Amino acid sequence: MKFLDEDVGFGDLTSDLLIPRGLKARGFIVVKGEGVIAGVEEAEALFRQLGIEAEAKVCDGEAAKPGDVIMEVRGEARKILMAERTVLNILMRMSGIATETRRLVDKIKEAGLNVRVAATRKTAPGLRLLDKKSVMIGGGDTHRLRLDDAVIIKDNHIALVGSISEAVKRVRERVSFTKKIEVEVQTLKEALEAARSGADIIMLDNMKPDEIRVVVERLREEGFYEKIILEASGGITPHNILEYASTGVHVISLGYLTHSAKALDMSLEMGKPS
Amino acid sequence: MKFLDEDVGFGDLTSDLLIPRGLKARGFIVVKGEGVIAGVEEAEALFRQLGIEAEAKVCDGEAAKPGDVIMEVRGEARKILMAERTVLNILMRMSGIATETRRLVDKIKEAGLNVRVAATRKTAPGLRLLDKKSVMIGGGDTHRLRLDDAVIIKDNHIALVGSISEAVKRVRERVSFTKKIEVEVQTLKEALEAARSGADIIMLDNMKPDEIRVVVERLREEGFYEKIILEASGGITPHNILEYASTGVHVISLGYLTHSAKALDMSLEMGKPS
Amino acid sequence: MKFLDEDVGFGDLTSDLLIPRGLKARGFIVVKGEGVIAGVEEAEALFRQLGIEAEAKVCDGEAAKPGDVIMEVRGEARKILMAERTVLNILMRMSGIATETRRLVDKIKEAGLNVRVAATRKTAPGLRLLDKKSVMIGGGDTHRLRLDDAVIIKDNHIALVGSISEAVKRVRERVSFTKKIEVEVQTLKEALEAARSGADIIMLDNMKPDEIRVVVERLREEGFYEKIILEASGGITPHNILEYASTGVHVISLGYLTHSAKALDMSLEMGKPS
Amino acid sequence: MKFLDEDVGFGDLTSDLLIPRGLKARGFIVVKGEGVIAGVEEAEALFRQLGIEAEAKVCDGEAAKPGDVIMEVRGEARKILMAERTVLNILMRMSGIATETRRLVDKIKEAGLNVRVAATRKTAPGLRLLDKKSVMIGGGDTHRLRLDDAVIIKDNHIALVGSISEAVKRVRERVSFTKKIEVEVQTLKEALEAARSGADIIMLDNMKPDEIRVVVERLREEGFYEKIILEASGGITPHNILEYASTGVHVISLGYLTHSAKALDMSLEMGKPS
Amino acid sequence: MKFLDEDVGFGDLTSDLLIPRGLKARGFIVVKGEGVIAGVEEAEALFRQLGIEAEAKVCDGEAAKPGDVIMEVRGEARKILMAERTVLNILMRMSGIATETRRLVDKIKEAGLNVRVAATRKTAPGLRLLDKKSVMIGGGDTHRLRLDDAVIIKDNHIALVGSISEAVKRVRERVSFTKKIEVEVQTLKEALEAARSGADIIMLDNMKPDEIRVVVERLREEGFYEKIILEASGGITPHNILEYASTGVHVISLGYLTHSAKALDMSLEMGKPS
Amino acid sequence: MKFLDEDVGFGDLTSDLLIPRGLKARGFIVVKGEGVIAGVEEAEALFRQLGIEAEAKVCDGEAAKPGDVIMEVRGEARKILMAERTVLNILMRMSGIATETRRLVDKIKEAGLNVRVAATRKTAPGLRLLDKKSVMIGGGDTHRLRLDDAVIIKDNHIALVGSISEAVKRVRERVSFTKKIEVEVQTLKEALEAARSGADIIMLDNMKPDEIRVVVERLREEGFYEKIILEASGGITPHNILEYASTGVHVISLGYLTHSAKALDMSLEMGKPS
C-alpha cells in the first residue's frame, strides 16, 4: 500500500470530483506489447485491499501478446481509477524484467546450452523482492538475495586478509554450515586457489570468454568442475551472452536484467474488452 | 534506510567475518559510462546516517565521463562495504534517468525548439520522488506528482459526466483555486471543446504529429495558444520526439524516461583513485 | 489505527475486566449540538477494521441538530467501547471544522457575495488531511495542501531574490507547467508588480479592507481582475469576514477554521436510540 | 518528523527554486498574543533533526506577551522555511491549550479554591501525548492517559454487571494493584454505593452544582471525603467552572481544554528581532 | 505481522518450490508438555490475517497435557507452513510464562496464603504486552506496564531529592490524581517514612523474609497495613517464594517469570489429529 | 527505539517529576552472575540515540563474573534512568543466551569432540536477529536465519511430493545455485535416500543416539560422510548433549538455547563503581 500512497497523496482529486461515490465499474488490464507476464499476484493483492474484485486471466510466467487481457476487475469506479497507475507500474516493471529474462534464457536453450541466467543485487532501490521475483518468473536464477544469505568473498576482502585460501578458511570456520561460500576471482591462478581452498562457487569476474574457457578447462582437469559451480559475471549483455554461455560456466549473471530492462507496456481500460 | 535494510538483512556476512571491526578505509565512486549525475544528495545522506564521511566531487546535474570519481568516502570499512550496493543502485538509477532526460532536452534545444520534456507517473513503484527528481535534475519537467496535486480529466471521466465542458465546469466549481485543470483529448473537436471550457492545459493523447499540428493551428487561430498549455503524450520515443516537438506543442511527456531508461554504470573502489 | 493505538495502549482495562468476550451490543452516535457532520467515512472505516458493522444515518456534509443519531453500530461490546473515544474525537473535530466553515460560507452567500472561504496550512499537527477534508465538506476551499503542490512566493523569498518580478520569472522557468504560482504582497505597488510578472494568484496579506479595495480597483482597471485570482489573508475572523468579502477579492483564507474551531459535541450511547 | 512529512510532501517547491542551497539564515519565533508557551521542546527537537540550531528564549510554562521572541534559530534558510509551518502549528496548538488551562487554574486559585483542573481523553486524534502535555504545562492534571492506565467504570459497564458494588468488586479482584479504580455516577445513591464499594475516585457526571454539593456533604458525613477523590465532569465550561469548583469536589475535568481551545498566534520572522 | 516478516523474509523457499499453489490442508497444534495455554488469541489473529481458518480447542488460561490439540487450522498449505514457526514461537513463549506463573500462584494458594504473584518490567525486548498478558493469563498481576502508568520512587530518586517524604510530597503535588505512588525501600526506617508520607504502595526491595516480617509487623501496629499495599521484590525465586509469601506482604514480584521461564513445547502437525 | 517506546509510553513519570532537567549523572552496568556478555553493541547504540555517552568495559563474547562493570555511561540523569530497564532487558537476554551457548560449546570441546552447537528458528517473536546473534557470540552456529536463506525439506513436503529423491530433484532444478538443500529424515532408509539424492545437509530428526550412530556409520561406508553435513535435532538438552555429540554428527541443534535460556542478571547503578 505504500506504493499506492505515494501516488494518491491526499486523494484522487479528479475522480473524487467527477465520479459518484458508489458507482460500480469493470476494468480490463490490456497488454500492449509482447512478453512474459509478472506481478499478477501483487496486482490482485493491491486491488483486494481496496475491496476491488480482481480476476487474473493470465498467470505469472505466461506469455502474452498485444491486446491480451491479463486481468479483469470489478468494483467501485473511484477506487479502480485510484489504483490504476500504481498497479500498472508494478505489472509493467515486473513483466519487463520477466520478459527480458525469458528472452535470454530461451536464447541459451535454443543454442543447446545448459547455463543458468542469474540476476545480481543491482535492483531498483526498495524493489529487491519484486525484481528478484520477476527474474524467477522469467526462468532466471535469483542469485544472492541479500548480504546475509550467502558469502561472496570479493577482491577487497582478499586484499585485506592476504590470500584467497586464508579468507575461505576463516569464513568456513565461522560461518553457519547452512551457507555457501562464493569467491570472486579475476585470473586462472586465483580460480585455482579458490577451488583448492574449498569454495562452493567461483565467480569469474570481468574475464573474457577465452580466459574463462582456460579456467574451465583447467578446473575440469583438476576434478573440480563437478563439485564447484562456476559463474561468469561482468560486462555480459544480451549481445555477447552466447559467447559467455558457451565457455562451460554453469551460471551467467547480469545486472542488466534488473537495472535496465524495459517495461512491458499495458493499460487499464474501463468497459467491455475488445 | 529501508533501501539499505532490504539489502543487508541480518548483516553483511562476508565483511563481518573478514574485516576487523573499526578498520578504516577510503572508497571512491567511479563512473563507468558517460552521463549526467543524479542521486548525490541521497548517497551522501545514506553514508552519513552510517557515520561515513562522504565528499561529493560532482554535483547533481553535472556531466561525468568514464573514470570520473564522483564521490569519496571515508569511514569504517565494514560500513562502506555494507552500503556499497545500495548507494550504487540509487546513483545508477537516478543518473540513468537524468542522463536520458538531458539527452532528449538537448536534442530538442539543438533543433532550435522550445519545448519542455516531461515525465509521467509511470515511475518505479516506491520511487516516485527519486524518479521525478532525476527527471528534474536532467532538465525535464516533473509533471503531476500525484493524483492530488493537479486535475487531469481523462476519457473515463468524460464518458461518465457526458461532455468535456460539463466535466470542466463541475471541477472548476469545486476544486481548490490553487489547482490547474488539464483535459486529455483525442481529437480536434475535443481539443476545441476543452479550450472553450476553460481548461488550463490540454493533453493531446496518442495523436499523430500531423493531427497535432492541425489542433495547434486551430487553437492559435481561436486565440487559445497563448493562454493554454498544450502537451503531446502517448507513443513518443527518443526516435520520434523531434517530430512531436516541432508541432508547436509546449510540452512533450514520455513514460519511457522513468520506466525504461538504462542505469548509468558505476562502481565503488577501495583505496587510491586511478 | 494509530489514532486508536494511542488511546488503547495495551488494552481497555475496564471493559476487558467487566464485559464478557463475545457479548454483542448496539451503539448510537448522537449529536449534542447543531452543526454540519464530517468524519463519517473515517468513523465507518475505523469501526469496520475492528469488525464492527457501522451504518451511517447522516452523510458527510449534512446538517444535524441535537439528538440526531448519525451512526448506528453493531458488534462486540468490548470493541465498540474500545473505539468509542477515538471515533468521537475524529467526528467531533471534523464536524466542528465543517460546521464553522459552513457558517462562514453561508454568511457570505447570504450577503449576496460570491467569495470562496479557504483554509490555510495552519492545521493540527498530523491532521492535515482530515482538517482540509473537513473544510471541503463544510463548503470551503482547501487551498494549498502541502509545500509541494503549488508555489507561494513570500516576503522572505522576495527579499532574497531582489524583486517580485525576478522571483516569478525564475520560478516560471523551472517549475512544472502543472503548478500555479501565487505571490504574497503587502502593498498596491507589489500587487501590480506581481500581476505584471504573470502571477496566477495574488495574496493580499494583512491588508485592511480599504487598502484591498484600492488594489482590486486598480487591477480591474489594468485588466488583470479576470485573469488573476485575488486572495485576502491575515487577521480575518468571523467578525470582520463580510468586510473583507465585500472588497472584491475572490478568496478569503483563515487559519482560524482549522486551528481554533470548536468541536461539535457528540456521544456514543449503548442500547436503543431515543 | 511525520508532522513535517505531511506538510512537505516531495519538497518545498518555492524555496527550492528561489533560495540557494547552503545559504544560512536566522529566524525568530515571535508570539502575537498573550499566553503560556508550550511545545518548545518539540520545536527544538524538530529543528535539530533538520540540522538547525534552535535556542529557546522562553521555557515551556512561561508566560509571553505579543512581540516576545520565544526561540531563535540558525541554519540553512531552505530548511528553516521548510520547517516553519509545522513548528508553528505545534507551538500554536500546544500554547493555546496551555494558555486556556492556566487561565482556568488561575481563576480557581484566585477564588481561593483548591481544586484541580483536569483534561479528558477528548484530544485531537494522534495528539494525545502533546495535548496532555500542554495541559500539564498549563498547570492542569492530565487525568487518564489511555484506556490501560486506570480503570473507569461507566454506566454501560454497570448496566451489564448489575450493580456498582459488583463491578468494583470484580475489578478489584483482578486488576493490577498498581491501578486506581474510578466510578462514574449520576446520583447520590450511586455515589454512596461507589464509595462503600471501595472506589478510589468517584466521577460525578453531568450533575448540577447543587446536586454535587449534596453528594459532597453526604460523603463527608460518612467519612469518605478524605479517602476518595471526587471529580466533577460534564457540561463544565469556563463560564460555570467556579460554580463547580466551589462545590467541594477535588477535581474538575473539561474536554473543552483539548478539543476547543484557541491556538495562540505566532509567526516566524527571518532577520533581526524587533 | 512483523513477527512473521522476520521469519519469512522474501518467502518460504521450500514450500513455494514443493507445494502447489492453492492446495488446501488441515493442521493441528499439539502440546508436548503439561501447562497453561496462552497466546491463542494472537495465534488466531495471525492465521486469520493470512486467510487461514483457525479454531481454538483450548482457551487462553486453560490447562493442557501432552498430546492435547489446542488449535485446528484449515487453509492453503503453503500459508499454514509459512506461519507455523512464528505461531508456535508465540504460543510456546506465552504458554511457558503462563504455566510458570500459574505454578507459583497455585503454590501460594495451596499453602493457604493470600498473596499476589506479580511480574516486573523485565520482559523480553519488544514483548512487553505479550509477556504481561501471559502473566495475567497465568493468574498473576501485571504490575506497572510502563514508566508512565504509575510512579515508583527508587533509591536514585530519593538520593537526589534528599528524603523519601520530600520525594513523595513533590510527586503527590504534581502527578495526576489517577496514579498510584509506590516507594522502594531497603530498611524498616525507610518503610516507615514512606508509609507516613502517604505512599500507596511500598516495595520492600532485596530484604530477607525476616526483615520483611519486622516491617510488616510494625506497619500493622501503626495502622498502615490495611491502607498501604506491601510488595516484596528482589532475589525471589520459585524455591524461596513461600518464605516470602508467608511474611505478610500483599504482593510478591519476580523478574524470573518473564525473563527466564521455559517455553512450553508444541508442534504443528498436518493431517489427522492423534 | 521501539524497544524503548514500549517501556516509556508517554514518559518516565517518576524521573520527570523528581529529577531536574539537565542534571548530569554517571551510571554503571554491573553483572550479578557469571557468564558471557552479549548485547553490548545494541546497548551502546540505544544509549547514543538518546545522547548518552556509553563506554563498553567488556566486549561482546567476553566472560564476566559477578561485580564486573561492563559499561559506563554519562549523560542526562533523566535519560539514563529512562533507558535503564530497556537496556538491561536487552543485555540480560542476549547474555543469557550467549552464556548457555558457550557452556554447551565448551562442554563438547572439553569432551574432545568437534561438533557444532546450532540454534533453531525457535526464537522469541520479534527477536530473531538478536537471539541468533547471541548464539553466534556464544560460539554457536546460527543455522537457517529465515525461511528464505536455505531449503529444508520436511516430512510434510515429502509426503506431498511422494519421495525424498523427487523432492530434492525438484528443488535442485529450481532453487538458486547459492542455496544449500537440507533434508529432514527420521530413519536410516530416508537418510540414505537423501544422501543419494544429493542433499547438502541431512537433519536426523528425533532419532536416538544409537540410531544416529548407525546412520553415521552407513553414510561413512557409502562415502557420503565427507560430503554431506549431518545434523542431529529434536529432544536434545544440556543433559544428553554429549551423547548426541559423540555419535559422529557434525552439528547439534537445540531450540532450548533461544526459547528457554535464563537471563544473566545485571543492574544499572548510579554513582561510583564498587
Image (spheres, coloured by chain):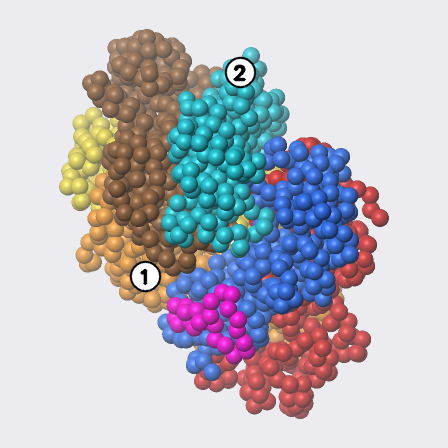
Chain colours: A cyan, B brown, C yellow, D orange, E red, F blue
Q: Are marks 1 and 2 in contact (CB under 8 Å)?
A: no
**Which structural element holds mark 2?**
loop
Dot label at residue D34: 1
What residue lies at 45% left-to-right and 29% top-to-bottom?
A: A213
Dot label at residue A65: 2
Q: Is residue D62 visible?
A: yes
Magenta-tinted stretch? F53-76
Measured as percent of width and height from the top left, residue A95 is found at 51, 26
Q: Are marks 1 and 2 on the same chain?
A: no
The residue positioned farthest toward the right in the image shown: E274
Measured as percent of width and height from the top left, residue F78 is found at 43, 71
Amino acid type shown at disc 1: Glu
Amino acid type shown at disc 2: Lys
Using the image, name the chain to which the residue with label 2 belongs: A
> Between tags 1 and 2, which lies in front?
2
Q: Is residue A22 magenta?
A: no
What residue lies at 42% left-to-right and 17% top-to-bottom?
A: B164
**Is residue C102 rendered to the left or right of residue F235?**
left
Few, some or many residues within 10 Å of mark 2 (<14, 14–19, 20+): some
Measured as percent of width and height from the top left, residue F4 is found at 50, 62
